[in-house]
Image: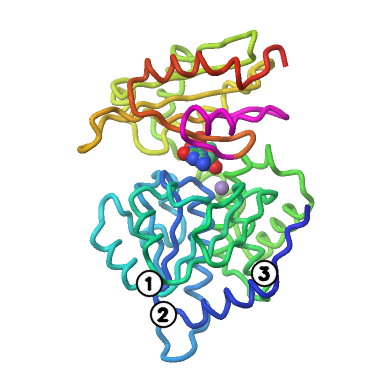
């Protein structure tokens, strides 16, 4: 299906952007490369856009919690406001906002504590996203599940208006395209994608340097944690072509876990020739006010084997057909029991 914007929506969105004086861009919890890329791509573009009227345009990116170190180099990352560590500033920005632009999430639940504040705010909201079935919280919705990433939609939104991206903006967009396709190994067969990449290269991005900045800057602890998880913690259920990795809070502490340190881990068991489903569970210690630990669960699959229904019906989550997430408040053991009880219903044996 072609990605086509309704021109009336684009025009209205641009009028709002032109008039706005305090734009707040929000992206999802545990920001990944596409969250960062789509939000900062927009931020860089808006910062460079000529201002009319009284010459005032503030643009800020808000995220609910910390983003990984290996995205700190991204142009504009140093100016992001993180709710978890700077709630006052975040609240102030939300109160003063006269336009919200949301990227890479389809439900206010995905932005944690900011969600209720966003819903309560009266300023207009634009959503740019590639997840299925967004809930009804935005006034203009650019939702294209067929896009490889939210960054792709941001790029197209900017281009459709005839504007050009700076090299900083283009760098952010490329980071989103690269990370949400596993460096162009899934969701990445459309010719249009490679035409976009060609345009980004013409805009001046250093493609190989971006790869290096994201994928070759890990800590020793992170690489050792990956080794430990695969060697000691990966369980295979051969008749179901299924793999499970669990990491407890204690195990993560041993490797001085930092946000993002296990990003990509869930994809690794799929390297095994007859593993088509992979699940990874990570235990977070209880936070004040939540007596139980939170188990964060990632699901991945290959081909025509959906995991999003499983994630949604059993683990209060959802996502794409081949990449979903969910959570459980309880012990890792409880999560594993629920997983073992439920997988025969949701995945095909010998499929
Ligand atoms: P990850 O395993 O990388 O955290 O999440 C994979 C994908 O699943 C994300 O890109 C997002 O689309 C989706 N996802 C993750 N967690 C949730 C969740 O709690 N609810 C929903 N609806 N989708 C999620
Ligand atoms: Mn995305």
Say above or below: 293 vs 38: above
Residue linked to disc 2: 21
Q: Viewer-nearest of labels 1 and 2?
A: 1
Most extreme residue toward the left, as rendered?
A: 288
Q: Is residue 350 left or right of residue 30?
A: right
Residue linked to disc 3: 159
Q: Is residue 130 left or right of residue 234?
A: right
Report which quarter residue 196 is drawn in: bottom right
> Could you classify mark 2 by the number of other residues whose Cα lies within 10 Å: few (under 14), some (14-19), or many (20 or more)?
many
Say above or below: 75 vs 55: above
Q: Label 1 near label 3: C-beta < 8 Å?
A: no
Whether ligand 2 has any atom under 8 Å from the Cβ at mark 2 is answered as no
Say above or below: 5 vs 283: below
Q: Is residue 215 shown to the viewer in this render?
A: no
Residue 244 marker: none
Say above or below: 65 vs 137: above
| x and y, in percent, of residue 190 in the image | 77, 48
What residue is drawn where x is 31% and y is 69%?
95
Looking at the image, is mark 3 or mark 1 earlier in the sequence? 1
Label 3 sits on a secondary structure element that is helix
Q: Label 2 near label 3: C-beta < 8 Å?
A: no
Q: Is residue 310 highlighted in magenta? A: yes
Q: Viewer-nearest of labels 3 and 1?
A: 1
Residue linked to disc 1: 97
Assign the C terminus to one quadrant of the image. top right
Give the magenta-colored segment's residue range: 299-319
Q: Nearer the viewer, residue 152 or 324?
A: 324
**How far apart are the two marked residues, 1 and 2, measured between alpha carbons?**
8 Å
| x and y, in percent, of residue 68 in the image | 40, 44
Q: Is residue 191 left or right of residue 255?
A: right
What residue is drawn where x is 57% and y is 67%?
140
**How far apart are the two marked residues, 3 and 1, measured between alpha carbons?**
25 Å
């Amino acid at each position: 299906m072609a990605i086509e914007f309704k021109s009336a929506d684009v025009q209205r969105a641009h009028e709002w952007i032109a008039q706005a004086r305090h734009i707040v861009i929000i992206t999802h919890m545990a920001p990944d490369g596409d969250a960062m890329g789509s939000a900062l791509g927009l931020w860089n573009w808006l910062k460079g856009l000529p201002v009319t009227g009284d010459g005032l345009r503030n643009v800020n990116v808000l995220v609910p919690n910390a983003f990984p170190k290996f995205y700190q180099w991204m142009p504009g990352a140093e100016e992001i406001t993180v709710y978890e560590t700077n709630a006052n500033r975040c609240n102030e920005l939300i109160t003063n906002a006269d336009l919200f632009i949301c990227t890479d999430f389809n439900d206010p639940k995905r932005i944690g504590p900011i969600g209720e504040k966003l819903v309560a705010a009266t300023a207009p909201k634009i959503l740019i996203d590639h997840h299925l079935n967004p809930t009804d919280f935005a006034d203009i919705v650019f939702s294209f599940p067929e896009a490889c990433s939210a960054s792709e939609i941001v790029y197209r939104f900017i281009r459709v208006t005839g504007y050009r991206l700076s090299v900083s903006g283009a760098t952010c967009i490329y980071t989103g395209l690269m990370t949400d396709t596993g460096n162009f190994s899934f969701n990445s067969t459309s010719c249009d994608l490679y035409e976009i990449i060609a345009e980004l290269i013409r805009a001046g991005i250093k493609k190989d340097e971006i790869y290096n900045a994201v994928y070759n800057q890990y800590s020793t602890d992170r690489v050792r944690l990956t080794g430990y998880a695969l060697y000691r913690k990966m369980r295979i259920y051969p008749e179901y072509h299924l793999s499970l990795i669990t990491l407890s809070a204690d195990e993560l502490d041993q490797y001085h876990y930092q946000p993002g340190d296990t990003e990509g881990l869930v994809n690794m068991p799929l390297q095994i020739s007859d593993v088509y489903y992979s699940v990874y569970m990570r235990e977070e210690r209880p936070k004040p006010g939540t007596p139980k630990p939170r188990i964060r669960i990632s699901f991945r699959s290959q081909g025509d084997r959906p995991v999003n229904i499983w994630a949604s019906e059993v683990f209060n989550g959802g996502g794409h057909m081949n990449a979903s997430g969910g959570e459980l408040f309880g012990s890792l053991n409880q999560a594993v029991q629920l997983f073992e009880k439920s997988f025969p219903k949701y995945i095909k044996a010998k499929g």
